[in-house]
């Protein structure tokens, strides 16, 4: 663009621009002409006020132009654009960043990213099973005598008992996913290690920070508590490394029932709150009502006061 000055013929084409804006807008929503801006040589954009509800501060922008040495102005485009003080929608944020605790409802699915920093690969025994199968000619290796013991246990159970139901469930699982008894994968499932991903160190620290903030020693409830959760009988300790700092409250009348609490947290529902020594209270004041204290009833005319020593002198009682 060689000049910032609007072309004269294009700047005068206000009526042409208004007609184009009224064709694109709803009836009666094109307001006053606001400005004419030079976009280039013989290219001018006319701005009109938008009166449509919900578009406060927006403008209809209609661009006109003319060819070199031509006196006929043509229409380029018309569009609704925000002005300097326009009412705009908030900046778009991905759903993964908009999600907040408690947003999920029944039937909602929350996919976890493959590279989620809160998770790391777990141990399922699949890799070791493949290695054992290759070493044993295509079958997973089984510890000596383990398969025989499993068969004996299944043979001794009574039909219809919980043990028989468990055996049937194991048989169905083996049909769905053939895993040899006594194999590394089966042992991993028994020990609770058969998960593809587990919490990473970052995930553990992030969870600990959230729990510490919600039910930690710095909360108002913990500051007013008679003792901490570490000595409470309603505390259910966690497993693993989190056991050293957290547990689960099992007091149905406590404010944190069913929640993970810090060992430094506390509330008035402590199991030993009734037997804990209370701070000493000062004795109530003693009022002596056997002695009559003289006091002035009315001032004396001479500047002094008349003192009464008892009701007998005032009313003439003996």
Image (cartoon, rainbow, N blue to C red):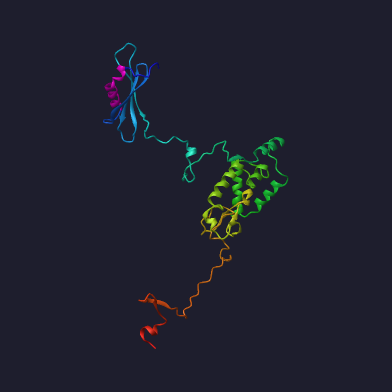
Please report the residue visible at 56 percent of the width from the left and 46 percent of the height from the top.
209
Please report the residue visible at 54 percent of the width from the left and 49 percent of the height from the top.
213
Q: Quadrant of the rendered structure where residue 292 is? A: bottom left
Where residue 91 sits: x, y (%)?
44, 35
Q: Which residues are magenta?
A: 8-24
Could you say which is closer to the camera, residue 134 or residue 191?
A: 191
Could you say which is closer to the camera, residue 35 or residue 251?
A: 35
Q: Is residue 97 left or right of residue 200?
A: left
The N terminus - image quarter:
top left
Q: Is residue 18 magenta?
A: yes
Vertical comparison of 286 with 124: above or below: below
**Magenta portion: prevailing SS class:** helix
Q: Quadrant of the rendered structure where residue 137 is? A: top right
Could you say which is closer to the camera, residue 203 or residue 85?
A: 85
Where residue 318 sits: x, y (%)?
39, 88
Vertical comparison of 199 with 85: above or below: below
């Amino acid at each position: 663009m060689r000049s910032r000055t609007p072309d004269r013929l294009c700047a005068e084409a206000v009526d042409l621009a208004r007609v184009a804006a009224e064709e694109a807008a709803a009836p009666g929503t094109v307001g006053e002409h606001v400005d004419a801006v030079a976009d280039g040589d013989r290219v001018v954009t006319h701005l009109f006020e938008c009166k449509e509800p919900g578009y406060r501060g927006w403008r209809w922008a209609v661009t006109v132009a003319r060819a070199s040495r031509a006196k006929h102005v043509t229409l380029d485009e018309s569009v609704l654009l925000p002005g300097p003080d326009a009412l705009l929608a908030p900046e778009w944020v991905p759903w993964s960043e908009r999600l907040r605790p408690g947003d999920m409802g029944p039937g909602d699915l929350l996919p976890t990213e493959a590279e989620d920093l809160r998770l790391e690969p777990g141990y399922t025994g699949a890799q070791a099973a493949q290695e054992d199968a290759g070493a044993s000619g295509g079958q997973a290796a089984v510890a000596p005598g383990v398969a025989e013991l499993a068969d004996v246990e299944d043979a001794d159970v009574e039909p219809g008992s919980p043990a028989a139901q468990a055996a049937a469930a194991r048989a169905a699982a083996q049909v769905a996913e053939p895993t040899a008894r006594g194999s590394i994968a089966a042992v991993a499932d028994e020990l609770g290690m058969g998960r593809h991903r587990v919490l990473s160190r970052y995930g553990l620290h992030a969870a600990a920070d959230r729990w510490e903030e919600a039910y930690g020693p710095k909360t108002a409830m913990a500051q007013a508590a008679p003792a901490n959760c570490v000595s409470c009988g309603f505390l259910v300790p966690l497993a693993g490394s989190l056991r050293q700092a957290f547990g689960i409250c099992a007091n149905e009348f406590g404010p944190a029932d069913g929640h993970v609490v810090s060992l430094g947290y506390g509330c008035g529902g402590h199991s030993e709150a009734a037997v804990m020594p209370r701070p000493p209270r000062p004795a109530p004041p003693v009022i002596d009502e056997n002695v009559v204290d003289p006091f002035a009833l009315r001032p004396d005319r001479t500047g002094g006061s008349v003192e009464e020593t008892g009701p007998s002198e005032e009313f003439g009682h003996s």
